[in-house]
Amino acid sequence: MTNKIIALVDGSTYSKSVCDHAAWFAGHGGYEVELMHVLGRREGSGGSDLSGAISLGARSALLEELSKIDEQRAKLVVRRGRAILEDAKALLDEAGVRATEHLRHGDLIEAISETEGRADMILIGKRGEAADFAKGHLGSNLERIVRAASKPLFIASRAFRPIEKVLIAYDGSASAMRAVDYMARSVLYSNLAIKIVTVGSATEAAKKGLEDAKAMLSAAGLKAETGILPGQPEEALGKLIDEAEFNHLVIGASGHSRLRSLFVGSTSLEMIRTCKVPILLVK
């Protein structure tokens, strides 16, 4: 593992939580932190071209003035992006964590695809700048990243709490086993209380799956309890998180067919939407 995370910040309410979680990763797991802010193509170019909206025959002085406005707006957007990174870096500096900054231009998904190879994990807030206006929905950028990212994706909740109790949602899928394997190989989960849970019937196959997952963690020196819950995954897991006060959920992005993989996994997306604690999503 590279032991490096790329933390995406956008100036929203969730950016502070992203920084707080990044600082916790650095302190608990020795992670290097790279802060990244991405200017979309329209932002970087100043949005719409005002000068191009003038009809034929308009005075050239007005065209020139509007062109200057376009240029000034583009410069302001870049300055804002740098300010967002500077503020994020200041938060990490206060926590005693050194971080690098990276201002990118272009499409967000392309930026992640080009940079995630040098990181072990992508860290992002659950919602972006419109968070206060869309509390029942995922941020549009987050949904795109969930579908496109190949590296584990850590989705920060609105407010940071130190991670002490971890719940693993295990359904026997290949992605669920990869999530357990990721935890076993990561320094992040040492000395934390871990519970592996399957939702459904207590079949022999379910019990064996839990024991296999527990054995994988045990081989890495991590202790874990197991359990089987009745009901539907979203409701059962959410209730357990609240009642047992878990403060982190690990889940595989299940995809047992081409159609399901297109949607990442209905349970995974629903848990991201409704869960109040940070989630690690492993494909």
Image (spheres, rainbow, N blue to C red):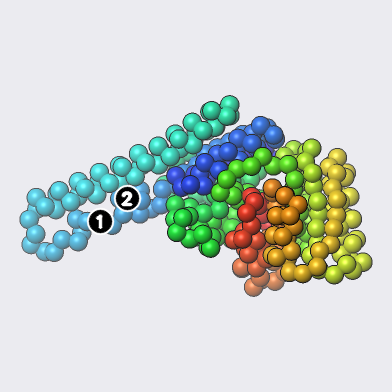
Q: Position of residue 185 (x, y in %)?
A: 77, 43
The amino acid on which the numbered mark 1 sits, given as a three-letter code, is: Asp
In the depicted view, which residue is nearer to us: 59 or 130?
130
Q: Position of residue 237 (x, y in %)?
A: 73, 60
Q: Residue furthest front?
A: 243
Q: Which mark is residue 5?
A: none
Image marks 2 and 1: residues in contact by CB distance under 8 Å: yes
Determine crowd level at label 2: few under 14, some 14-19, many 20+ residues with C-alpha closer than 10 A: some
> CA separation, marks 2 and 1?
8 Å
Q: Secondary structure at mark 1?
A: loop
Which residue does the image show at 25% across and 56% down from the upper left?
49
Residue 133 located left or right of residue 96: left
Q: Which mark is residue 49?
A: 1
Q: Circle 2 is placed at which residue position?
A: 45
* Residue density around tag 1, few if under 14, some if 14–19, many if 20 or more, within 10 Å: some
**Is 58 on the left-hand or right-hand side of 116?**
left
Q: Residue at x 69, y 47 (%)?
A: 247
Indicate the amino acid at tag 2. Answer: Ser
